[in-house]
Image (cartoon, rainbow, N blue to C red):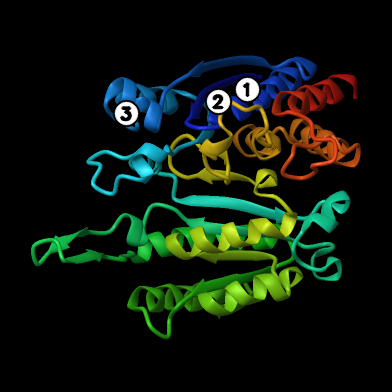
Amino acid sequence: MKLKLAILPGDGIGPEIIDQAMKVVKVVAAKFNHELEYEFALTGACAIDELGAPYPDSTHELCMNADAVLFGAIGDPKYDNNPKAPVRPEQGLLLMRKKLGLYANIRPVVTFPSLLHKSPLRRELIEGADFVAIRELTGGIYFGEKGRKDNGNTAFDVCEYTRMEVERILKLGYEYAMKRNKKLTVVDKANVLESSRLWREVAQEMAPTYPEVTTEYMFVDNAAMQIIQWPKNFDVMVTENMFGDILTDEASVITGSLGLSPSASIGIHTSVFEPIHGSYPQAAGKNIANPVATILSAAMMFEYAFNLMEEGAIIRKAVDASLDAKVVTVDISTEKPYSTSEVGDWIAEWVAKN
């Protein structure tokens, strides 16, 4: 099979972790006799610095013509610390989601047996935890009308959803639940927000069409608590954009490190596969960042974009083997940490040999 990829390293540690993921992608492609074609493009702060835009037209064209996008991270302190910056790296991320129609972000939350001791939660709470969080990605407060009034002393951000947007993401949630343990948790704030009441109304209308799935409704503050108290009670969680942003970052600590959590953003056009941890500028260029989340994002890419399940599975096995062998970066172990590139080399070599 021909695999045509757009590679967007982005900012901070993005180039380093993308390099390790590409080592693994190349080995997998060679092992399974796939023809790999890929091209790099700029996005984020580096794109602003060089081209004046965080998601240039040339980058978008490359993404549209690719079968999948492997993405690193966006963000730079010089923009983070300047609230009046007219152009920001994060605007590129939102624009990419909008222009590619990436309406759903899928984040698996799983624990690794060899790293249960690294989680801030007790072993008995997290052992066997395995759920999927599905976050709506192109609506809500991040994309609503926003601005200032009263000479800049009053700011507003509008949270808006259409019935179509809600139906689309809930349908995806139900489809995932049907493939898993047939339980869907719809997270909202319907006791306060009108947009959430629309979410719950639509979910209640759709639930009877999926009689095999148990549908439960949970306010977002309760969900934030229950993710920590009883993470094993969740199977598939679906929620709106801002709630999903917060809850999935919270859920990621269950595994013991942000550097272990991959994601897939899917929708109308080309799907994007990326780690959830951000650009981590403090570690940029130091060869200490954890590349595992990006490597696991590449596994999701093989599975979701190309339906190549065996290829994804061997990457996951290689990651498990590296964790069991304690080939890990400093965020997981300070005793004998491996560098970013050493972890990438080890996983790529394991794939080649097995």
Which of the 4 quarters of the picture holds residue 14?
Answer: top right
Quadrant for the C terminus, please.
Answer: top right
Between discs 2 and 3, the one toward the N terminus? 2
- Residue 274 lies left or right of residue 188; in this view the side is right
- For the residues labelled 1 and 2, the Cα–Cα distance comes to 6 Å
Identify the residue under disc 2. 15
Q: Are marks 1 and 2 in contact (CB under 8 Å)?
A: yes
Q: Residue at x 80, y 43 (%)?
A: 333
Q: Is residue 341 above or below residue 296?
A: above
List x then y, in percent, for residue 154: 17, 68
Which of the 4 quarters of the picture holds residue 2?
Answer: top right
- For the residues labelled 3 and 1, the Cα–Cα distance comes to 22 Å
Along the viewing direction, whichever of 208 and 108 lies nearer the viewer: 108
Along the viewing direction, whichever of 310 and 145 lies nearer the viewer: 145
Which of the 4 quarters of the picture holds residue 275?
Answer: top right
- Which residue type does callout 2 highlight? Pro
Quadrant for the N terminus, please.
Answer: top right
List x then y, in percent, for residue 126: 79, 65
Along the viewing direction, whichever of 340 and 311 lies nearer the viewer: 340
Report the label total. 3
List x then y, in percent, for residue 220: 52, 75
- Picture disc at residue 48: 3
Between discs 3 and 1, the one toward the N terminus? 1
Along the viewing direction, whichever of 143 and 343 lies nearer the viewer: 343
Could you tell me if residue 298 is visible in this image? yes
Identify the residue under disc 1. 19
Q: Are marks 2 and 3 in contact (CB under 8 Å)?
A: no
Q: Residue at x 77, y 22 (%)?
A: 345
Callout 2: 10 Å neighbours few (<14), some, many (20+)? some
- For the residues labelled 2 and 3, the Cα–Cα distance comes to 16 Å
